[in-house]
Every structure is written in C-alpha cells, then in structure tokens.
Image: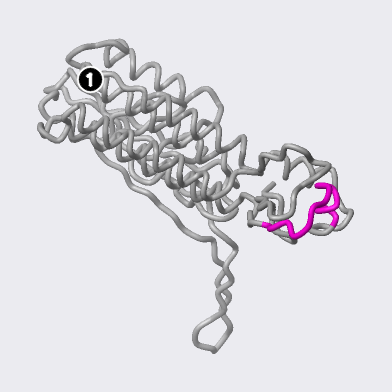
Amino acid sequence: MDEWAHLLFEASYGGMKLDVVGVEDNVSRDVVVTTYPRRDGGHVDDQGAVPRDCRIVVVFFPYENETTGSHIQRMAAFKALLHDGKSHPFVHPLTGTFEARPSDIRLSADAQERNWITMSVTFLEASEEPAVFELGPGSPVRAGVEEVLAAGVDLKSALDDLGETSTIADDADALAESWEERADTISAREINLELNDLANDIADATDELELASDVANYPTIQAFDRLRNNLRNLADTVISRSPQLISHGVTRTMPLMAIVSELYGDDDADTRYQQILELNDIRDPLRVEAGTTLTVQAPGSSDGS
C-alpha cells in the first residue's frame, strides 16, 4: 500500500486522522410539492436545506513506520469514536469542516488481502451553523479557527513523514486564535498584513525544504496550501464580522470624550471611548491635538459581535 498511500485523501473525525479512498456528498433541500386535480404542474414550496450527508470510504493499512498503533488498533479506536454517542468535528477531505454524527457504518475486508480493511461511514451534519467551507458574512469565526487548527495538524503529520519540522503550523494556530480574540477591533488592513507575513513565511519554508524538487513531497505541498487557504477563508470571515473602521481627522484640540460624543452621541460612550484608546496611541486622552488622525469605528456600523 505504501507505494500509492500518498494518493489517498486525508480527512479526520474528532481529531483522528483518516485515510480516505472515496467520498460522496449529498446536499439537498426539503421541498413540498402540491398538485391539483385536473391541472398540470403544481406548487413547490422550499422548506430549507436538510442536513448534508457525506459518505466516505476509509482504508486502514499498516504504515511503514508505525507510530500510532497497528492498523487494527487504529480501526478499533475509530469504531469506538463512532459509537461514543457524541458529535465531533468532521474535516472533509476536500471541502471543509462541519459538526457531524455517524449513521450508516459498514466494514469490509478481502480474504486475499488481509493487511488492509475498508470501512464505509456516512456522516450527517449535526449543526445549524454553516459549514466552514461556506465562509462569508454570518459564518462562525470559531469554525474557521477550527479549520486552521485541523490544517495545522495535517501539516505537522506531513512534515513528520518527511522527517522535517517547521513552526509554521504553530504560528498559524496562534494567528487564527489572535484574530478570534480581536474580531471586534481588528481592521481589515491589519488582518491582511498579518496574513501576508505568514504567507511569505510559508513560501520561504517550502523553498527551504526544497519540496518542489521531489514528486513524493506533493502531499506536504498540499498541506501547506490547505493551511494558507484556510487562513485566507478565516481572514475573510473575520473581516466580514469585524466593525467597519475609518480614519477621523481631529479639526480642533479637544478631549477624547468630546470626540466620542460628536461621533456617536451619548449612547455607549464608555465602550466607544475604550475602543478608540485600544485602536490608537493616544498620549493624553484629555487633550487630543488638532490635526491628529484617529482610527475609529464608522458611526452606525455594528460592533462586530
């Protein structure tokens, strides 16, 4: 199996890495069709999307350098996870992450090939939150963070297989968590600058490791690409949910609280005051000099929560 193992899809469920040989998704909507006597056609009423289901075929086989137990032990651990009665994050091999529960589970083996076993599992989406691959306005930031973390785990595994190490995955994890913490105040410019810095680090790491020189390194290149793409998706989501920030020029010297009152009125003045302090380097809030340019939340925009 080792000669073609690098061609397998990679997925995970509940944090457990899975080798996948096939995947099939069913994304459908629930509709009610009403027909009428002696009349052609009918009325179709859309009731909304039904939980997506994804059938994957997982293969368990001996790894050349076993570090996670035999393939029988890995299969047993996966079966135990499937039967724990809980939902877990399912990282789809192609399209993203969603909370899922297993339904139909089928096991098969060939008497001619006893060193590998296949298992067919259907996962049902078990959340009303949009899946990570549907990132955009309204998507959960935490889901995007989980996708980055999962990609980081896959990258570390791919590098381990090559006997290499890199801090890129840890750096990406820290950046994703930081964006989540600062989602209410961080600007699109800051996010894009930080993303660009890490993207440059990823490019430098792939050059330093000389991954492009050997086709066997392709899975590691894919892992780097997936991490970069997931960071980009998370960045877009945080930007869509963060407050709209603008530049405000101070025309006359005045206290910061007076500026807050001019911009927003007296509603939630203390919160607005603290926000501007966090977004700017203001030496003396009691005297903001004329000509100062402040970064502030656009009046009338949401607070990103």
Rendered residue at 55%/38% (across/down): 179
Residue at 46% x, 29% y is 173
Identity of the residue drawn at 85% across and 55% down: 261
* Residue occupied by mark 1: 161
Residue nearest the observer in this picture, 255 or 296 = 255
Rendered view: 46 above or below 207:
below
What sort of colour scheme is used for the picture?
A: one colour
State the residue in front, 290 or 151.
290
What percent of the width, then of the height, locates residue 111?
A: 15, 22
Q: Give coordinates of residue 257: x percent, y percent.
A: 84, 48
Q: On the picture, is 108 further left or further right than 272?
A: left
Q: Which of 197 and 238 is in front in this view?
A: 197
The residue most toward the right is 266
Neighbour class for label 1 at 10 Å: few (<14), some, many (≥20)? few
Q: Is residue 132 visible?
A: no
The relative height of residue 246 versus residue 229 in the rendered view (above or below) is below
Place of residue 245 in the rendered image (x, y in percent of width and height, measured from the top left): 63, 54
Tag 1: amino acid: Asp
Query: Which contiguous range is marked in magenta?
Result: 248-261
Tell me: 134 left or right of 5: right
Picture residue at 79% right of the left edge, 44% below the top:
273
Left or right position of 116 against 138: left
Magenta-colored stretch includes residue 289: no
The one of 212 and 97 positioned closer to us in this rendering: 212
